[in-house]
Structure formats: C-alpha cells, structure tokens
Amino acid sequence: MFDGKQILLVVAGGIAAYKSLELVRLLKAGGARVRCLLTRGGEQFVTPLSLAALSGEKVYQDLFSLTDEQEMGHIRLAREPDLVIVAPTTADLMARLRSGRADDLACAVLLATDKPVLLAPAMNVRMWENPATMENLSVLEARGFHRVGPGTGDMACGEWGEGRMAEPAEILEAAAGFLADRTRLAGRHAIVTSGPTHEPIDPVRYIANRSSGKQGHAVAAALADLGARVTLISGPVRLSDPRGVAVTHVESAEDMLQACTDALPADVAVCAAAVADWKIADAARNKIKKQANGAPPSLALTENPDILASLSAPGATRPALVVGFAAETENLLENARRKLARKGCDWLVANDVSPATGTFGGDRNQVHLMTRNAQEDWPTMDKTAVARALAGRIADALEAQA
Ligand code: CTP
C-alpha cells in the first residue's frame, strides 16, 4: 500500500499520542519508510525509544541539535517525505501552525515543507469547538492542510463529544487514499479562475463584486491534490495562495483573459471567477473630481470579454474539458441550463448566490452539476468538499477520455 513511500509522522503532546505507536506499526506493515518527529509535549506521552523501535529509524526532536542537523537538516526532513502526518495534532500546534511559528522542530518542518500534510486533531471537545480553534482550522484548511477526524466519543478527560483522534486504521486509510489520488491527474494541466475582478473607474475607484474566491481557490487546491499542474488566475482576494499551485494575480477581466490565454494549452479549465460583466468604457487617467454644480459623473459601461466563452470556443487549444460556474439569484436551474448552452462549456456548476444563502463570501455551498444532458443536485457542503468532489469528477472524465 505504501511501497517506496516515505512518511514523516509528527507526534505532538496529547494523550492520543499512544495511538500513534500503532499508526507507525501499520504504516511500516504497509511498506512505508516512517520517520518520526516528537515534540516536547509529545515526549510527555510517548518515549523516543518506542517510536525508534517501531519505526526502525532515528527519532527527531530538537531544532538546534548539531548532530541531527548534520545528519538530516530540518529542511531535508521537510522535503523528503511523500506525506507528512501530524497525529495527534493539538490545539496548540494548530494555533502555532496558523501563525507560521518556527521555534521548534515540528513547526519549522511544517513551515518548510512543500509536501501534503494530513492533520489528525485530538483535543477536549470544548477546545475543539472553541471559535479560536475553529478559526485556526478553517485558515489551515484554506491553506491546503488536510484533515482526518476528529471523531465523537468518550474522552480521556471523562467528557464526551467531538475531539477524539481518528483511529490509526482510519488515518492509515486516509493516507493511502491520499497518496493514491495524487497520481490521478499527473501530467495534466489545469487552469482555474477565481475571485472577483476589479474594473477601474479612475486610479482610486473601481467596480467590484462580493466574490471571496474561496470556491475557486479550493478547486485549484483540490486539482493539485490529484497531481495536476495547476495555474490559478486570481482576481483580488484576501486569501493566501494555495500550496502547490502556481498563481497569477490579476485585477481586471481583460488581464484575466490574457493570463488564461497565456497559460494555454491545458487539459481542463475551471472558470470559477465572478468576472465583472462590464467595465468603464473610458477609465479616467486622473481621479474624477466633484463638479462645481454638484452633478454626478455619468459612467459609460462597455461589455467585458467573456473568458469562459472564449476558452470554450472550438479550436486547437480548447481544453478537453471546460467547466463554468453559474451564479444566479433566481430561476437557478433554468438560467444555468441556458448559460451552459450559451457559453459552449461542457459542464456548469450552478449555485444560488442570493444573500439569504450566504454563498458569496461564506464557507458552504449547495451546487448542481450540469453536464450537456444530465444534472446532479449535490447536498450543501463545505466549499472544500464541493471542490474535492468536483476535482474527482474531473479526474473521472479525463481518465475516461484517455
Ligand atoms: N464568466 C467569464 N467571463 C465573463 C463573465 C462570466 O468567464 N466576462 C464566467 C464565470 O467565471 C462563470 C460563468 O462565466 O464561470 C458564468 O458567470 P455568471 O456571472 O454566472 O454569468 P454571466 O455570464 O455574467 O451571465 P449573467 O450576468 O446573465 O448571469
């Protein structure tokens, strides 16, 4: 299951650390080479000797150890594995990861790694439910960290609830699935557009919309997780660049179209950006001043290029699969079906963006996946779950075409 794979297991300080010993055994039995990194807190629960005996490898503990740095610098430790598993992931470690700390070996390695990281959180239910932890989690997930668990049940502290670390077999399965998936889109190039566009009125003002870019960024990250080379073309957003994705930052629709054209050829294009339909016909070179008579300026609009339609147009560089999104506030399905035909794309992900749904800017989304002759209604999910499901369907379609 893990033949030829290297796994770095970070064991932090929680009572669930005892389960990590079993995880090492299972990973080894599956054929993985396992190196362990034990934090100061972790040492309180399991000994380096147990981890060394089970893994058959030296255990790394100290950022400033001269011998460790000579043998295996922390950067190599971060770069060599195929996957990093953090089990247990404590609330404290999540907070430290979120803020980018590098003052111990675990944080330094997790900051330096460019490899996928699977977190297995474990903590008391109140700590897990605390808004601080939830916020840290959502930032880490948006940055591309993966998660397995926690589960619900009795806790070591005597309470009951969500926060139990996933069982070793569950972590093993998640790791195996994850590594297998990473080859599904290997050798494929994906272009993803995300976020709003800003259309200048003058040097200090612009037309924009409420898109946060969360859904598009999540799609880019999910495609990269399946092994695709991803070019994400992002309008102005307040999100970090997803890990393992090449990002081109643009402002206007014109620039976004140019960046997409420059990025071709691609096997798949996903247009999740909320591109402004109109731009100012003649943006002012200087700031527009108030007029003495108090009359407001009149702004003449002109249509922006349609990026999705131009990527969908038949031609030598048309991606094999072009996916659009439809943001609607009324007659969702009818409008989306018409949009699919009008734009010439292969699939359309339709979502209701009326204010009551909280979709624009929110974390959850309820979508309908429309193909040329079918429609699937997906349940309401996190935007990351929508992205993973969509990436999976894209991989199925490209595999079927191959
Ligand atoms: N889109 C695009 N370029 C544009 C406008 C839209 O690439 N100039 C893409 C979006 O990225 C999305 C799809 O087209 O994938 C549909 O966007 P949407 O805003 O729902 O539709 P519009 O084309 O703007 O149509 P309408 O305003 O009539 O809803």
Image: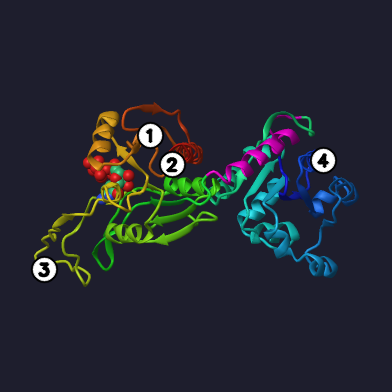
Query: Does dot 3 land on a helix, a strand or a loop?
Result: loop
Q: Marks 1 and 3: which is nearer the front?
A: 1
Query: Magenta segment, which residues?
Result: 159-184
Query: Does dot 2 land on a helix, a strand or a loop?
Result: loop
Q: Residue drawn at (29%, 31%), measured in percent from left and top? A: 332
Q: Estimate how packed mark 4 is, as few (under 14), some (14 to 19) or many (20 or more) residues with alpha carbons within 10 Å.
A: some
Mark 2–mark 3 Cα distance, whole angstroms, equals 42 Å
Identify residue for label 4.
Answer: 25
| Dot label at residue 362 | 2
Q: Looking at the picture, how far across and down is residue 325, in whole percent?
A: 34, 41
Q: Are marks 3 and 4 in contact (CB under 8 Å)?
A: no
Q: Are marks 4 and 2 in contact (CB under 8 Å)?
A: no
Residue 19 figure quarter: top right
- Mark found first going from the N terminus, 4 or 2: 4
Q: Estimate how packed mark 2 is, as few (under 14), some (14 to 19) or many (20 or more) residues with alpha carbons within 10 Å.
A: some
Q: Is residue 304 left or right of residue 255?
A: left
Residue 259 figure quarter: bottom left
Q: Marks 1 and 4: which is nearer the front?
A: 4
Q: Are marks 1 and 2 in contact (CB under 8 Å)?
A: yes
Query: Does dot 1 land on a helix, a strand or a loop?
Result: helix
Q: Amino acid at mark 3?
A: Ala
Identify residue for label 1.
Answer: 357
- Mark found first going from the N terminus, 1 or 2: 1
Q: Quadrant of the C terminus?
A: top left
Q: Quadrant of the N terminus?
A: top right
- Mark found first going from the N terminus, 3 or 4: 4
Identify residue for label 3.
Answer: 292
Query: Does dot 4 land on a helix, a strand or a loop?
Result: helix
Mark 4–mark 2 Cα distance, whole angstroms, equals 41 Å
Relative to 202, residue 55 above or below: above
